Amino acid sequence: MDECLFCRIVKGEIPSFKVYEDKEFIAFLDIGPVNKGHTLIVPKTHSETFMHMDENELGKVMHAVQKVANAILKATKADGFNLMLNNKKAAGQVIDHTHFHIIPRFHNDGFKHWPQGKYADGEAGKIATEIKRFL
Ligand code: ZN
């Protein structure tokens, strides 16, 4: 855990452009921003993925996200933002410490939304049933 980049940023061992901090979370600029102002919200307690995140923090993180996103919108004069969480390598998670991306977006920033697929006949019902089985 000592090697975790974000734990080291939380401890102040590695500098960051910190924009927000409270008891449970810090927010700092992503050093490789999609758009300028792209910010990461990071729980101070290490958890490898969202699925491992402390239950108590789960209830609070969205308050921090909303607060920081509001400031980003004002500071960057963005037209909107994306809130993203990459969970595990297959989904693009690079640092194994839970983090939320707030990415300011502009009408003409040129980024495309994800492509949309289609379900075959009966497929959506089967998948919905399978998901519900585990809830
Ligand atoms: Zn960590």
Image (tube, helix red, strand yellow):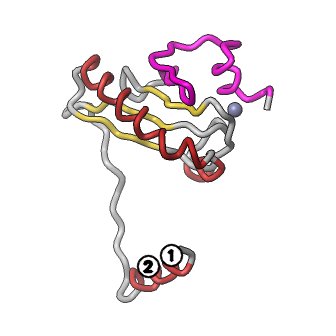
Taking the spot 60% from the left edge, 40% from the top edge, the residue there is 98
The amino acid pointed to by label 2 is Ala
| Badge 2 vs badge 1, beta-carbon distance below 8 Å | yes
Residue 69 falls left or right of residue 43:
left
Taking the spot 67% from the left edge, 41% from the top edge, the residue there is 47
**Vertical side of 127 occupied by 69: above or below:** above
Residue 44 falls left or right of residue 30:
right
Name which quarter of the figure residue 63 lies in: top left
Taking the spot 65% from the left edge, 37% from the top edge, the residue there is 97
Magenta stretch contains residue 26: yes
**Vertical side of 117 occupied by 84: above or below:** above
Q: CA distance from mark 2 to mark 1?
A: 5 Å
**Vertical side of 99 occupied by 36: above or below:** above
Circle on res. 19: none
Q: Residues within 10 Å of mark 2 (few under 14, many from 20)?
A: few
Ligand 1 neighbours mark 1 (CB distance < 8 Å): no
Residue 81 falls left or right of residue 88:
left
Secondary structure state at the residue bearing disc 1? helix
Ligand 1 neighbours mark 2 (CB distance < 8 Å): no
Q: Residues within 10 Å of mark 1 (few under 14, many from 20)?
A: few
The amino acid pointed to by label 1 is Ile
Secondary structure state at the residue bearing disc 2? helix
Which one is nearer the viewer's eye here, 125 or 118? Answer: 125
The residue pinned by badge 1 equals: 131
Circle on res. 128: 2
Looking at the rendering, the quadrant in which ligand 1 lies is top right
In the image, farthest residue toward the bottom? 122
Taking the spot 27% from the left edge, 25% from the top edge, the residue there is 73
Name which quarter of the figure residue 79 lies in: top left
Magenta stretch contains residue 73: no
User: What is the x, y in percent for residue 132?
Assistant: 49, 78
| Boundaries of the magenta span | 2-31
